[in-house]
Amino acid sequence: ELPSRIDQLVLLKNLRSKFQEGWYWSSEEYAGDADYASIQGFDLGYQDGARKVNECRARAVRRVPI
C-alpha cells in the first residue's frame, strides 16, 4: 500500500538515500478533497498536495506486525 504522510516522514528521515529526488504520492487525500492527494518531496523534504491527474512517483510499503 502507499505510505501515509507520517510514514513518508519516517522514510525521509531514515531511508532518504533509497529514493530518487522528486515527489511521491501518499495514501492520504489532501485537505479533504478527493481530487487531491498528499505528496512528499524526497529532495528538500517538503510535504504538499497535488491533483491526482499530475505525475508523481509512488513507492509501496508492506506492513509487517512486530
Image (spheres, rainbow, N blue to C red):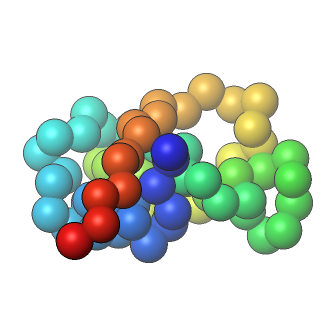
Identity of the residue drawn at 26% across and 34% down: 20
Q: Residue at x 86, y 47 (%)?
A: 35
Q: Is residue 49 visible?
A: no
Residue 17 location, x and y as percent?
A: 12, 45
Q: How many marks?
A: 0
Instruction: Judge by depth and name the residue closer to the eye, 23 or 2.
Output: 2
Q: In the figure, is residue 16 to the left or right of 60? A: left
Please tell me whether residue 47 is drawn above or below residue 62 in the rendered image.
below
Lateral position of residue 47 relative to residue 15, left or right = right
- Depth check, front residue: 41 or 61: 61
Q: Is residue 42 above or below residue 45?
A: above
Q: Is residue 34 left or right of residue 52?
A: right
> Where does residue 37 sit, x and y in percent of width and height?
69, 52
Say which quadrant the C terminus sits in. Answer: bottom left
Which residue does the image show at 61% across and 27% down from the upper left? Answer: 55
Residue under the point 60% across and 53% down: 27
Percent across and percent down for residue 12 are 26, 60
Image coordinates of residue 24 in percent, x first then y, are: 47, 43
Q: Is residue 1 visible?
A: yes
Relative height, residue 61 to residue 12 (above, below): above
Q: Can you say whether 25 is above or below 13 in the image?
A: above
